[in-house]
Image: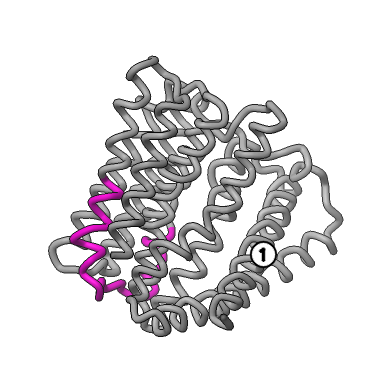
């Protein structure tokens, strides 16, 4: 029970820390007169990936690489199967042209790069982490130069409010401390829970931890549907998956190479991640072109539940 408590408190601290860090980062960027489109693509994206990044780095350094890998793979599957599935069951969303011109192809390329890097030698080396970051930078530069209209601004009016310097610094410090403390508690709880239930760290990471880190996106989606506002953007979810692979795993593997210990990740989980990513393409075009509704939501959610069922067996 104590381990579960650590996981819950750790997740709460990570969510709050990420939110505070995001607020401070956006305020600082606006103060420096950085264009909002650049802030949305870089500062916001990195800040929203901060919880996953901190957890992955901490887990890898502490000798639990399966937590780092399972967190990213599980989070990517949960973003599409759980978050997107529930969202479109509650209310249909229209899919923009950027889905098949930019977002989905890049997500698939990033996923395949990850697969190739880890499947054959069971490890992501430092140079491979560098290549991941280079590809991410090239993608961001391409968006800025050629696909500005495809980029959705992610800065809310609340975040855009000008913050006094002392508040910006305070949010940066508190956010950083909360992320560090949350990662400590989450990893301690996850390892303890895995030991108590006699399962591997990978299973806990791919289920409990990844669902926990997807809760903010899920909550935001449900609130948007209830308020009859625009539901969470499919492009933002795909962007999150791209950053999880290229930024989180890229930076973590540069700091310390990540080795897959539990081969269930390579024999099972990574194929589910590739599969649900591929499944998204026909769902967007059939039966109703460029729209995701209840039927597609049920298929995505059923796929996610099936994945979790076979993972914990």
Residue at 45% from the left image edge and 20% from the top image edge: 291
In the visual, does 216 lie left or right of 277? right
Give coordinates of residue 272: x percent, y percent: 27, 50
Instruction: Confirm whether the magenta stretch covers residue 266.
Output: yes
Give coordinates of residue 313: x percent, y percent: 28, 65
In the visual, does 134 lie left or right of 118? right
- Circle 1 sits on which residue? 17
Give the magenta part as a residue range.
248-274
114 is higher (above) or lower (below) than 180:
above
Q: Which quadrant of the figure has residue 33? A: top right
* Quarter the N terminus occupies: bottom right
Residue at 60% from the left image edge and 35% from the top image edge: 37
- Label 1 environment density (alpha carbons within 10 Å; few <14, some 14–19, many ≥20): many
Give coordinates of residue 141: x percent, y percent: 44, 39
Q: Assign a secondary structure to mark 1.
A: helix
Instruction: Confirm whether the magenta stretch covers residue 64.
Output: no
Towards the viewer: 145 or 74: 74
113 is higher (above) or lower (below) than 66:
above
Please name the predominant secondary structure of the magenta segment in the image: helix
Residue at 34% from the left image edge and 19% from the top image edge: 285
| Residue that sits furthest to the left in the current view | 120
């Amino acid at each position: 029970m104590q381990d579960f408590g650590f996981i819950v408190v750790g997740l709460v601290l990570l969510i709050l820390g990420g939110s505070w860090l995001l607020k401070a980062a956006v305020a600082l960027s606006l103060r420096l007169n950085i264009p909002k489109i650049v802030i949305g693509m870089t500062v916001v994206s990195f800040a929203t990936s901060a919880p996953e990044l901190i957890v992955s780095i901490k887990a890898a350094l502490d000798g639990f690489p399966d937590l780092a890998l399972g967190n990213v793979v599980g989070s990517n599957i949960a973003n599409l199967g759980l978050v997107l599935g529930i969202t479109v069951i509650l209310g249909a969303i229209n899919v923009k042209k950027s889905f098949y011109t930019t977002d989905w192809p890049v997500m698939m390329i990033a996923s395949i790069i990850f697969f190739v890097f880890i499947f054959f030698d069971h490890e992501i080396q430092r140079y491979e982490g560098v290549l991941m970051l280079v590809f991410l930078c090239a993608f961001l530069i391409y968006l800025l130069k050629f696909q500005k209209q495809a980029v959705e601004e992610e800065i809310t009016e609340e975040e855009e409010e000008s913050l006094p310097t002392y508040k910006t610094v305070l949010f940066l410090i508190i956010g950083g401390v909360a992320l560090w403390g949350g990662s400590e508690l989450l990893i301690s709880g996850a390892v303890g829970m895995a030991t108590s239930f006699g399962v591997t760290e990978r299973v806990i990471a791919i289920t409990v931890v990844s669902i926990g880190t997807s809760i903010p996106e899920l909550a935001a989606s449900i609130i948007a549907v209830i308020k009859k506002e625009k539901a969470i953007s499919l492009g933002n979810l795909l962007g999150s998956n791209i950053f999880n692979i290229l930024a989180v795993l890229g930076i973590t593997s540069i700091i310390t190479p990540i080795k897959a210990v539990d081969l269930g990740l390579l024999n099972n989980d990574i194929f589910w991640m590739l599969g649900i990513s591929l499944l998204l393409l026909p769902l967007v075009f059939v039966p109703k072109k460029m729209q995701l509704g209840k039927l597609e939501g049920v298929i995505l959610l059923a796929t996610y539940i099936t994945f979790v069922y076979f993972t914990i067996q």
